[in-house]
Amino acid sequence: MKRSLYRRLHHTLHPYLGHRTAMRVATAVFTVPDPDVPRWTPGPGWIEMATGRYWVRAEPEGERGLLHTWTLDAHGHYTDQPALVSGVTDCHAAIVDKAHRAYDYLQAGTMRIVPCPTKHPAHQYWQYVEAFTEKFGRQVKQLHNAVDYPLGYRTLYLQPRVELRLDGRSWVCSVEVALSPERSYYWWDLARATDVLSQLVRHYRVPHIALYCETPYPVTNPLWHRGWAELDAYRAARV
């Protein structure tokens, strides 16, 4: 399996944005079953756009986003009190990318802030997602550290990501891979990347790992793309 993965990865890698001197990039994707995900929803009409942290609902006055984030104190600083913050917005991507932007991109007159104690099912869902995400990222880092140069001399970059699949009972785990374009480093990076990916496959006992030239966002972010399709259908129906 390792030799096959090595060959497949070599044939999948390509220069970033087509530039001859750019890093050689690819994305590896596999599925991890998890029937114990404590999924939560704000209620009817809400569409989950980002796992455990962002939902959208179409309303007559506009699209309302709801984010799992933190409350602010009187000075505008974050507290340690989790909250569900909602409001009408057309900047969904900006809010998902950085949670603190909720207070800037949600319309102030429509904003609602609801405390979310640790026993709240929304917070428990978010914590479960965070725990799995951190565990996966930590494992990729540990495997990388075990096979590569010390950090300051490293030419191989691995970026792990996790999102929930549409079935709600399995994770789509992806690793964006970037290798040096220099021949003296490329083959070393290819061997190290293969080592890490093959060990991940064995650890999670997955039967198949898919490799893509470009990051397949509809695959790696299925909730986001399904959500946009539903929002587009709603917008089309209102025209």
Image (tube, rainbow, N blue to C red):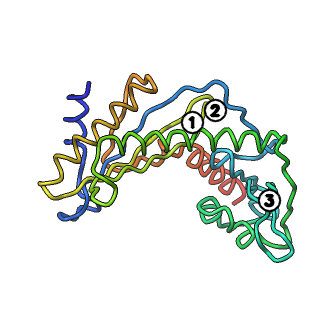
How many badges with numbers are in the image?
Answer: 3
Q: Which residue is mark 1?
A: 165
Q: Residue at x 31, y 48 (%)?
A: 26
The percent position of residue 164, horizontal first and vertical second, equals 59, 38
Seen from the viewer's position, the closer of residues 212 and 73 is 73
* Type of amino acid under label 2: Gly
Which corner quadrant of the image does residue 155 belong to?
bottom left
The outermost residue toward the bottom is 75
The percent position of residue 225, horizontal first and vertical second, equals 55, 48
Q: Secondary structure at mark 1?
A: loop
Circle 3 residues within 10 Å: few <14, some 14–19, many ≥20: many
Q: CA distance from mark 2 to mark 3?
A: 23 Å
Mark sitting earlier along the chain (2/3): 3
Q: Which residue is mark 3?
A: 85
Depth check, mark 1 against mark 3: the one in front is 3
Q: Secondary structure at mark 2?
A: loop
Mark sitting earlier along the chain (1/3): 3
Q: CA distance from mark 1 to mark 3?
A: 24 Å
